[in-house]
Image (tube, rainbow, N blue to C red):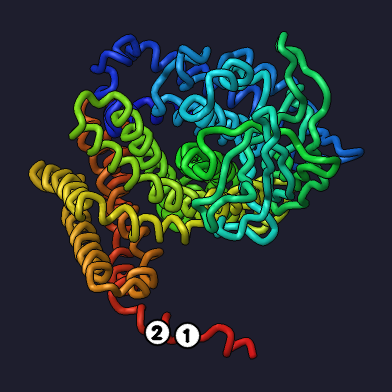
Amino acid sequence: MYRAPVDEIAFTLKHVCGLSDLQKTERHSELGDDLVDAIINEAGRFAAEEIAPLNSVADQHGTPLENREVTTPPGWRDLYHGWIEGGWNGLSASEEAGGQGLPQMMSAAALEMWNSGSMAFAIGPTLTMGAVEALEKHATDELKATYLEKLVSGEWMGTMNLTEPQAGSDLNALKARAERNDDGTYRVFGQKIFITYGEHDLTDNIIHLVLARLPDAPAGTRGISLFLVPKFFVNEDGSLGDRNDVHCAGVEHKLGIHGSPTCTMVFGDEGGATGWLIGEENRGLACMFTMMNNARLAVGIQGLGVAERAFQHALSYAIDRKQGKAPGDKEDGMSPIARHPDIKRTLLAMKARTQVARAICYSCAHAIDMAHVAEDAEAQKHWSERASLLTPIAKALSTDFGVEVASLGIQIHGGMGFIEETGAAQHLRDARIAPIYEGTNGIQSIDLVMRKLPLSGGEHIKGFIAELQAIADEAAATNQPDFGALAHRLTASIADLQEATDYMLNAQADGRVADALSGATPYLRIAGLALGGALLTKGALRSAEEPAVKQSERTLLARNFCETTLGETAGLKSDVLLSAEAIQAFDAEALAS
């Protein structure tokens, strides 16, 4: 069973990732600690008692398609309506649109628990939240009046339609088209694939946000527009009218997240699906990126949520399963495997990776929130750049860690982990998509190196690294014996990050783009590991007023991660500095011939 780690979530929000900064602002001054705790506890209760019990049911049932209609798993519809009745869908939406106006940090915390309950369930509402933000920022008042309130409440759900059979990561290849109508609407034609919750029975209407090209659009991504295409038209009185010319032509059979329908959507088979322009013509990608940037953080949180669930699953099994005799165990009979040193090592690795993902995702949400409440241009620029820097790290490292933790969970289960009935395998199957969608982790690495490192002429990343070093220096200054070699190892890792960063910035300045791209993936992991070690260390430093057992646990976690996992950064730095020549010389096509 899943139990929401509400104490750890609250501590990370308040003492590691800066929630108190937001509580001091005028916009969030009413968000006291009591309210924070109440929200976290109720979100955790709902995740543990309502969502989690249906996770394996959904995995086994899937989402069958018949006569263009998708049926969601048993109990899914009641679960969803209970979720929207709790007001969870509008947690961070503006109060003007009917939401609660809470910071992204609170949404991130709740989203973690919902994903631990069931990643397949949580992904649907996540996309609706993204659609809400796109409409709030870019839609006309008329479109907002028609659609926004019911999307905020969750009465209707939203989707994001980008991918086509020939256009995955490269939207230059997008072929879906739109034609202008005399009444100001548009007719949309084309096929979209991998559309999450593109068709389902949870809500009466589904609001599709669709990228398409107009006939006179410029080539490339500068010629893409964004359209709102509802499943059903909306009458002037708000009631639903006729069906639009959009339908589901197929549902994918996937490795995991079986409870989430992944659809092939066809627009315009019967003369054209009617759509309304969001934003300006040929500026649709800018509007869609409003959804995509938040979606990337949300996918990072998916990795976190599955990691927490997989860790709890493995911990429970390790305590119950008895095999052999652990060193020093004086009890009669076999020992629980949780007492064996190698299993302890594995559980520590799982726990540390989960907490690193939590702290990084919450830190990214904090930066997004601070950019929204910043009172001057300089502060707004700083926090916007910080959010931009952290987003690819949060997405990529957290989803990589989700896969790693889920895989380690299977290992702890031994042969039983390879058997579906234990449930350990589902976590790995579910987690494996997260490093792929919303921009593969390779693309996140490219984004980090090519777009985010040069922010403010490279000054922002320098300030970021200095902040990490300040945490290492604080740890060293404590002279705390329990910290062991933590501060030394963290400082060495930060030095690896600094050297790799200098290489990347110099490579770009010298026009050696291929050299920078060759090392982008290991560079992102260096940055994520160094940041993760610093945040775990910060948690240990800020535990002084916590119960002794919590102080010890956080110190142990930070020390173990810094003394073991951070050793990877030296090898990763060598990868960044030395691998470009061999990578560029490799000819995959010649190998295949």
Residue located at (34% from left, 60% from top): 450
Type of amino acid at the residue the image marks with label 2:
Ala
Q: Residue 227 — which label?
A: none
Residue 270 location, quadrant: top right
Q: Nearer the viewer, residue 576 or 493?
A: 576
Q: Nearer the viewer, residue 178 or 424?
A: 178
Tag 2 near tag 1, CB within 8 Å: yes
Residue 374 location, quadrant: top left
In the rendered image, which residue does mark 2 sit on? Answer: 582
Q: Residue 586 — which label?
A: 1
Please say if 514 is above or below 437: below
Q: Nearer the viewer, residue 485 or 123?
A: 123
Figure quadrant of the N terminus: top right
Residue located at (28% from left, 73% from top): 511
Mark count:
2
Q: CA distance from mark 2 to mark 1?
A: 6 Å
Report the residue that reaches farthest toward the front. 182
Residue located at (48% from left, 54% from top): 400
* Residue 87 drawn at (x, y percent): 57, 15
Figure quadrant of the C terminus: bottom right
Please say if 54 is above or below 347: above
